[in-house]
Amino acid sequence: MSEFELGNLIYLVLLGAVLVFWFVVQNRDGMGKTLQYVAVWGLIFVGTIAAIGLWEDVRQTVVPSQATFTEDGTLELLRAPDGHYYATLDVNGAPTRFVVDTGATAVVLTRADALRAGFAEDELIYFTEAMTANGAVRTAPVTLDSVAIGPFVDRDVQAYVNSGEMDQSLLGMTYLQRFDRLEISGGKLILER
């Protein structure tokens, strides 16, 4: 246990002791009711400590690790509960979460992701158009200096910045075609170089 964790534990124990003392003093006439309150607060306290201690395990269940890399150059992405495959890539050094979209022709960034990747708003010139499920949208062509996921680093990747509202950046076929094999099997998207 680190010093930080020990300090947190001491703080929580003291806080719990103060709450118990306050309940006892406040309700000294009705000790039966006070003991019920103490029991309830004790259970809440123990539950909170358990939740904090188990958070990493719970997080892995709710949001499993996104990618597995093997020594032979294979990347495996697990299917998310919503049925999509997600990957976090470093775009110009900025971690960017993408939905893998085999129906998208190109890599498409949201405006917010483009700004995080180092593009200034005034650099984005929306003079091209893309057809989406929601109709035509204006796009700004850009060149990404570097795109990296695990051991795979690509330079000078062509992409577009969407002028419309988009929840997630799209990892389209112009990037996915850089892999020798793309397979969906058993709840995994397998990419291999």
Image (tube, rainbow, N blue to C red):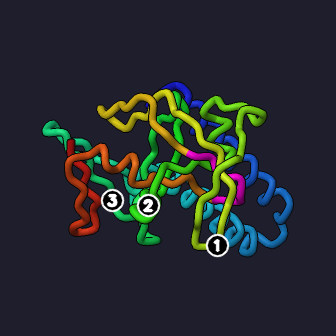
Left or right: residue 1 versus residue 112 is left
Secondary structure beneath dot 1 equals: loop
User: Where does the image place residue 115, in percent across and percent down from the top left?
Assistant: 68, 36
- Residue farthest along the left direction in this orientation: 72
Left or right: residue 131 versus residue 101 is right
Q: Which amino acid does label 2 sit on?
A: Asp
Membership of 162 in magenta stretch: yes
Instruction: Name the residue located 52 percent from the left edge and 29 percent from the top edge.
Output: 92
User: Where does label 1 land, which residue?
Assistant: 134
Span of residues in magenta: 160-166
Secondary structure beneath dot 2 equals: loop
Q: How far apart are marks 1 and 3 (CA)?
A: 27 Å
User: Where does label 3 land, which residue?
Assistant: 78
Q: Give neighbour class at mark 3: few <14, some 14-19, many 20+ (Cα, 10 Å).
A: many
Say which of 21 and 55 sits in front. Answer: 55
Label at residue 149:
none
